[in-house]
Amino acid sequence: MRIADHANVWGTRHPIPRTPPISATASPRAVAKKLDGKLTAATIRKEVAAEIAKMVEAKGESSRPGLAVVIVGDRKDSQTYVRSKRRACDEVGIQSFGFELPGDCTQEELEEIVDELNSRNDVHGILVQLPLPDHIDSERLLDRIKLEKDVDGFHPLNIGRLCMSGRRPPLFIPCTPKGCVELLDRYGIEIEGKSAVVIGRSNIVGLPVAMLLMHRNATVTICHSRTIDTKEKVQEADIVIAACGRAQFVKAEWLKPGAVVIDVGINAVEDATKTKGYRLVGDVDYERAADVASYITPVPGGVGPMTIAMLLSNTLRACKQQNGDE
Amino acid sequence: MRIADHANVWGTRHPIPRTPPISATASPRAVAKKLDGKLTAATIRKEVAAEIAKMVEAKGESSRPGLAVVIVGDRKDSQTYVRSKRRACDEVGIQSFGFELPGDCTQEELEEIVDELNSRNDVHGILVQLPLPDHIDSERLLDRIKLEKDVDGFHPLNIGRLCMSGRRPPLFIPCTPKGCVELLDRYGIEIEGKSAVVIGRSNIVGLPVAMLLMHRNATVTICHSRTIDTKEKVQEADIVIAACGRAQFVKAEWLKPGAVVIDVGINAVEDATKTKGYRLVGDVDYERAADVASYITPVPGGVGPMTIAMLLSNTLRACKQQNGDE
């Protein structure tokens, strides 16, 4: 089955490209093609849905994947993300279980919930929506999630396996980095031998995406807030992954003509012309960068939907592993 | 205590430099100063020895650190390494326990030994000399070593913690990468804000040293066997870590004048003028690189002795942790 295969980051990939394979630097000065995360994610959701339907038909309702989402407090952005995740689960036939706790809940209450979810047979993946309130020890909580149900892939043991070469692969690859690489693969964009610059070194995006690209034989440079010459580094990159959380930080003139640009950022900037008073922009100045890049992800509609698609794919994989099908 | 502090890779370091602090690019076209690993390691061994002597005097013989070394088969190089480690232990007052097994021993025999060492109170660190024969599942064996005794720091959970930011730090940092950074620190060489190129992406050197430098705010590029333009990457680096295991791979003309060069390689090359018929060289063309670099490690006498010194320091730390002193 294709989706699950993607979790094996170590082997050679044989993607079925939707467009003819191109080199990351093949189309200098072209207007970039959009790396359409929304469309690609929809394709993946269909694949996941088809597999789940087949599985449930063959093995009965008890084989249906289940994802539990724990959310604490009333952060608007967290609620929006969780809603999207729930909707996506519904669409593909994953049962979702929501646990909404007030912002002043205790560590013990949260740990009890995680313990219960760890032991439930109908829950195959557990997701704790971050960030958690300051009085909660996030690390202790996340480490408590059973490794087999850590569909976010944030457990340090999972990250350790993700970073190391030639050892047991991680059970799950974090969804956003996996979504970035999946998008490159689905568009047939070559990674091997390319120079990649990752801007941002977070545990959940920058670090793991750098490792994934490295294992796929790219030469990776990790820039971050203390990098003095990010611009110069970006100028040499065939593939740029922007994950620094700074609105339109990467400028068009930083890009090598023909570079492939993946924009992980989602930043709200004031915009009086919008009814909400703001609009969402990425970490890249999309409009002008599109004149220089060969491929670029829009924001929204790029990496965001891919992240959710990968969560579904990880949950299906978790279910199959726990049901002994993989 | 200074040595143990070094294990905290996340905090700001305040080294006591033995030479005035310099910028990594401060002395263009100077003949490089030697980063004397042999001398620095001797200093560290003295520090470790002094601390052990004090500890044993205060708390009695039962508080003495112990290191168990397991070696399989009769590889000459492995035996040489193990001998050096044992000698170093003797020198600083660490009890060493050797377990030599024939090359045809079984996985079960090795696992029994690891289990026994895991439970012994006089053994605080366990080291399995690599490589192991092909019929042994090295990963399964290494993963069996109690995390608290994994003084090599190779457990994936340790590596995961080493790679992640702002989480619980690893219990132990792998000895060679730790030795590289320690050497830079002892010479007062600034890491923050520098461009670093690591050549090699192995689990035991390239990957972890890249992560250590990244956490110290260097901008790190990881080159490897599939990198097309290693020369060009090296030309921009303030700090070069050569860990690819290829004799004199890095040429003088690749180096930016004033670069700091750490050579992790130890390669035997034929040399009829030597009685053994070979001599040891690093991954860098030392003689000519020394005309361009500002600082450079010799081979032998650079990283090698530092690795052993870090093993002693990790073992002392393990002992203190297990005795509840840290």
Image (tube, coloured by chain):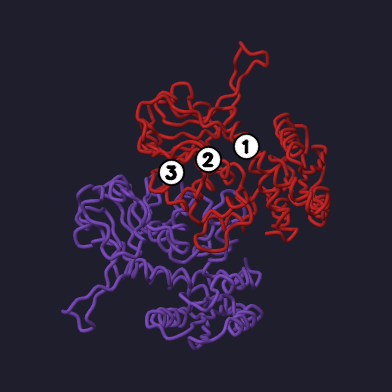
Chain colours: A red, B purple
Mark 3 nearby-residue class (10 Å; few <14, some 14–19, many ≥20): some
Q: Residue at position x 44%, y 54% from top?
A: B210
Q: Which mark is residue A43?
A: 1
Q: Nearer the viewer, residue A51 or B171?
A: A51
Q: Which mark is residue A190?
A: 3
Same chain, labels 1 and 3:
yes
Q: Residue furthest left?
A: B273
Q: Nearer the viewer, residue B177 or A169?
A: A169
Amino acid type of the residue that numbered disc 3 sits on in the rendered structure: Glu
Position of residue B246 in the picture relative to residue A242 (left or right):
left
Between disc 1 and disc 3, the foreground one is 1
Q: Which mark is residue A186?
A: 2
In three-dimensional space, the C-alpha distance between marks 1 and 2, rounded to whole angstroms, equals: 10 Å
Q: Is residue B22 visible?
A: no
State the SS at label 3. loop
Q: Nearer the viewer, residue B197 or A4?
A: A4
Specify which label sits upstream in the sequence, 1 or 2.
Answer: 1
Q: Residue at position x 39%, y 39% from top?
A: A23
In three-dimensional space, the C-alpha distance between marks 2 and 3, rounded to whole angstroms, equals: 10 Å
Specify which label sits upstream in the sequence, 1 or 3.
Answer: 1
State the SS at label 2. helix
Chain letter behind tag 1: A
